[in-house]
Image (cartoon, rainbow, N blue to C red):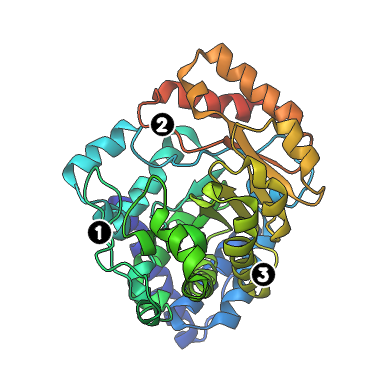
């Protein structure tokens, strides 16, 4: 167990014992300090998750969020702020030496992402190094699948493998309702740890896989270069694909709510493979299920920002916004000014530095960052890369990227 988790847990337990003792002795509590209120509301939310009280969770989480929202949340709401918030997709992971050292000791990706202490530590490594405005849960988009009856493995240096692909209606029948508290307790615990460590200095981010991308893994059984098995199913037996997508969307919507109720202050949906769809097929097999997930989340957590990212999704920007997401994350193949022009004013934008720019000189990085900020405008922009940071990116260049944004003022 990592030291900071143990200390945090000991402090919480000691506080709980003291409060209980005071109540039994009939003593009054001291007046609560102003800065303690968000943490008190968050603790109430965490306790409600453990007890399974969804109503209590929503009330407590909302109280914590509204008291003092992090910069990233305020940007997603189009509030006027002093600078754009900044984080990076895949910021927790393989480009950092501290992560590489840890991965050599813990060689299984699933161990690293499903062990609370390890996932907490990995999530916090970039926070300690660079102080990003978003601290994202270290996990995987496939993490909820076993809780739905779909087992998978991730061999080192290989993509995910699902031994029993889903390709018939009988296979779809195996997919059942997700009980996230039972099947992914480590997600709740990690998010709670992150909130305890970060407070409101940065937004704690949850994330989910989009129904279409998750369905492609389930149908193909592994990563693919052309997704022919999935597309064949789409075109020859669409009823099977829609049945699978519906079940996944319902579960993923609930899983996102579980993350929010565990401490996530914003959630990003990754649709890694929807960019290979034609616009017509996107409208049939992806967009309705984006909307389904958004509707489930917004019904329970209307004020929590939702971000969507589609790899190779430049042609789909307007469609991405139409699903009801608060923020559309764009890659570097579209100019930020054009992305702004194509999006509704009510939709914030995230991105969109080419990850390869971080191999350039500090001067080049600075120029690209400032150009992107200028084109994105005064409000509603979250600085990010247009894809995940590359594994061999120099850490000193990552540090310069973050510092450039943190030093900027509108």
At which x and y percent is residue 81? 75, 40
Residue positioned most to the front:
236
For residue 380, side relative to residue 14 (left or right): right
Give the numbered dot on residue 335: none
Secondary element under disc 1, as helix, strand or loop, is loop
| Sequence-first tag of 2 and 1 | 1
- Where residue 189 sits, quadrant-wise, is bottom left
| Sequence-first tag of 2 and 3 | 3
Rendered view: 12 above or below 28: above
Q: Which residue is rendered at x = 60% and y = 44% of the image? A: 313
Secondary element under disc 3, as helix, strand or loop, is helix
**Circle 3 Cα neighbour tier, 10 Å, few/some/many (<14 / 14–19 / ≥20):** some
Mark 1 — residue? Answer: 153
At which x and y percent is residue 265? 58, 58
For residue 87, side relative to residue 101 (left or right): right
Rendered view: 349 above or below 129: below
Mark 2 — residue? Answer: 390
Rendered view: 111 above or below 331: below
Q: Which residue is rendered at x = 41% and y = 31% of the image? A: 390
Q: Nearer the viewer, residue 85 or 221?
A: 221
Give the numbered dot on residue 298: 3
| Sequence-first tag of 3 and 1 | 1
Residue 328 seen in the figure: yes
Secondary element under disc 2, as helix, strand or loop, is loop
For residue 116, side relative to residue 68 (left or right): left
Residue 376 seen in the figure: no
At which x and y percent is residue 92? 40, 42
Q: CA distance from mark 2 to mark 1?
A: 23 Å
Q: Nearer the viewer, residue 206 or 37?
A: 206
At which x and y percent is residue 272? 48, 49
Mark nearest the camera among 2 and 1 is 1
């Amino acid at each position: 167990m990592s030291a900071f988790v143990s200390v945090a847990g000991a402090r919480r337990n000691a506080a709980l014992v003291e409060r209980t003792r005071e109540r039994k002795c009939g003593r009054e509590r001291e007046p609560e300090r102003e800065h303690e209120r968000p943490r008190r509301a968050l603790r109430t939310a965490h306790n409600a998750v453990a007890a399974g009280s969804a109503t209590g969770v929503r009330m407590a989480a909302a109280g914590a969020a509204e008291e003092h929202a992090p910069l990233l949340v305020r940007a997603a709401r189009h509030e006027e702020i002093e600078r754009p918030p900044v984080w990076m997709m895949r910021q927790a992971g393989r480009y950092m030496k501290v992560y590489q050292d840890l991965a050599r000791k813990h060689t299984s990706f699933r161990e690293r992402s499903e062990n609370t202490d390890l996932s907490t530590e990995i999530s916090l490594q970039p926070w300690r190094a660079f102080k990003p405005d978003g601290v994202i849960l270290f996990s995987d988009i496939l993490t909820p699948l076993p809780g739905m009856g779909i087992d998978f493995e991730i061999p080192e240096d290989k993509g995910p493998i699902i031994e029993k692909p889903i390709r018939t209606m009988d296979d779809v029948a195996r997919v059942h309702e997700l009980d996230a508290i039972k099947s992914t307790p480590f997600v709740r615990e990690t998010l709670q740890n992150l909130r305890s460590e970060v407070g409101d200095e940065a937004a704690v981010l949850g994330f989910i896989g989009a129904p279409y991308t998750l369905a492609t893994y389930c149908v193909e059984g592994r990563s693919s270069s052309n997704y022919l098995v999935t597309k064949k199913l789409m075109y020859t037996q669409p009823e099977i694909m829609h049945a699978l997508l519906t079940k996944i969307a319902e579960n993923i919507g609930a899983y996102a709510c579980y993350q929010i109720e565990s401490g996530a202050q914003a959630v990003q949906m990754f649709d890694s493979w929807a960019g290979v769809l034609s616009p017509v097929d996107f409208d049939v097999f992806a967009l309705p299920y984006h909307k389904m997930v958004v509707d489930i989340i917004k019904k329970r957590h209307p004020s929590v920002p939702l971000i969507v990212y589609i790899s190779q999704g430049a042609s789909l920007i307007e469609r991405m916004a139409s699903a009801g997401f608060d923020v559309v994350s764009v890659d570097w193949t579209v100019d930020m000014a054009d992305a702004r022009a194509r999006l509704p004013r009510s939709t914030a934008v995230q991105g969109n530095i080419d990850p390869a720019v971080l191999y350039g000189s500090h001067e080049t990085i600075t120029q690209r960052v400032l150009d992107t900020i200028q084109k994105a405008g005064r409000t509603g922009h979250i600085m990010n890369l247009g894809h995940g940071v590359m594994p061999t990116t120099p850490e000193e260049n990552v540090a310069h990227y973050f510092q450039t944004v943190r030093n900027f003022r509108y």
